[in-house]
Image: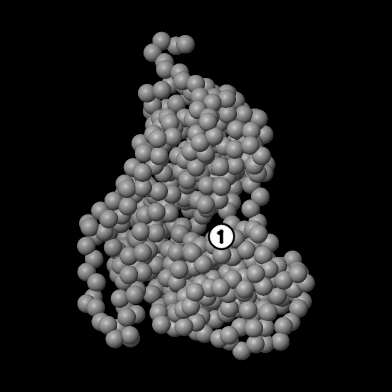
Amino acid sequence: MVMGELTEETEVLVIGSGPGGYAAAFRAADLGLEVTMVDMEERPGGECLFRGCIPSKTLLYLAELIHDAERSESMGITFERPRIDLKTLREWKQQVIDTMADGLITLSNKRGVQLIKGRAVFEGSDSVRLQESEVSRIKFRHAILATGSRPLALPDFPFQGESRLMDSTGALELKDIPESLFVYGGGYVALELGAVYASLGSRVTLAVRSERLIRGADMDLAAPLIHRLEKIFDAIQYNTQIADLQENDSSVTVKFEGEEKNWEQTFDRALIAIGRVPNSRDIGLEKTQVRVNERGYVIIDEAQRTSDERIFAIGDVAGGPLLAHKAFREGKVAAEVIAGEPSAFDARAIPAVIYTDPQVAWCGLTEEQARKQNRPVDVERYPWKFSGRATAMGLHEGLTKIIIDPDTGRILGMGVAGRNTEGLISEGALAIEMGALAEDMALTIHPHPTLSETVGEVADVFLGGATHILPRQRKKGPVG
């Protein structure tokens, strides 16, 4: 041992303390294994807690309150124009983060998980060297790689410190509320943060490289959200590329290339949200047997094993979908396999949720996927204009839909657009995982009046017995 070096040993080393990392560490500790978790942050939580899921949903909740105040005027209640106290808003966001982070420290301590601050770099298949840490090296029996991902920058336009060109992390800092904001991207982050800034008073222009937004969701589910964004955004530009971008102390000037025209526009700030890349480089993987694909994602099997028998990988670094709840499950699988338990990641449905207002959620087989596969399915929809609860809340544009195997009646997929879809979609995920039939969903008594009632009603549509919508003749065959 080199003089002055501190080397530790552990049964399970978890590298990264985000949702996947701490879920893996906690499960391994619960199974009786000695666990050490290393991260550059002082506290567990990772990108999701400090710079992603939690702060963004905190701000989206506040944006939802502003929207509700606006909608209530048509119902007979008028509020004054909201006054935004940006300092207090930032403090509330930080309070939410601190509460959850401190809770994770408590859970780590009570489970006996050792937390070490530092950056881990593999020096072989059984040890890492730590940078920026009091501990020099850690030898392990097994390691779980949970290093996550980071925002993808535009070529030639990297994200820099105090720049007016922001990634999602910079946007969530809420340094100010710009009068004008340019958002580039058509996925979760672009739409959620664009909606937040629009609600707070920014004039938002969104551009996307493709011909549509939310490419993973069926268009009928995306439609209510797009209709809302068209109202609160200044403009939405499709099939648009960035040809050039110039930044100065007070603005960002963007040169656009569109299908029919090229133009230039200046904004106070710009948010680039075009995707994420895995944190798999510069961590010493070349000194192990771990292999990555052409996009940098670590290659794993159904047990989260990499091509190195000692090393497992979970979460964003192991590939899509890049969702915290997928990482949770993968972390538990890796821990259970290491502990000798029979376990594998075999989920049939991983819910996706866009937390805008309205929200969009889906899981399992989509209608568009069925069409591309030329797969015979029955697609049933229940518009929320027939729901008493939705009507009372003024949520006329909502929609609940299910994708059904026409021969067996088994539920293959589900989608919801409207308020509180984050909770409603879980019933669809459970139905798919259990191989439930539409009849099972229809015969489950849902409370009235509720938004969840639309789930039972859409199943009743398939069976021909829906109460609040006229029956139609069932048609079997490929969607089209």
* Crowd band around label 1 with a 10 angstrom C-alpha radius: few (<14), some (14–19), many (20+): many
Q: Is residue 195 above or below residue 103?
A: below
Say whether residue 267 is visible.
Answer: no
Which of these two is toward me, 135 or 206? 135
Residue 166 locus on image (x, y percent): 38, 54
Which of these two is toward me, 71 or 251? 71
At x 41%, y 10%, the residue is 3
**What amino acid does circle 1 point to?**
Pro
In the displayed orientation, state which residue is furthest to the bottom.
470
Q: Which quarter of the rendered picture does the C terminus lie within? A: bottom right
Answer left or right for 79 relative to 216.
left
Occupied quadrant, residue 106: top left
Tell me the SS state at disc 1.
Answer: loop
Residue receiving disc 1: 351
Q: Is residue 476 above or below residue 352?
A: below
Answer left or right for 108 relative to 382.
left
At x 25%, y 53%, the residue is 91
Q: How many marks?
A: 1
Type of colouring: one colour
Residue 323 locus on image (x, y percent): 52, 53
At x 67%, y 65%, the residue is 436
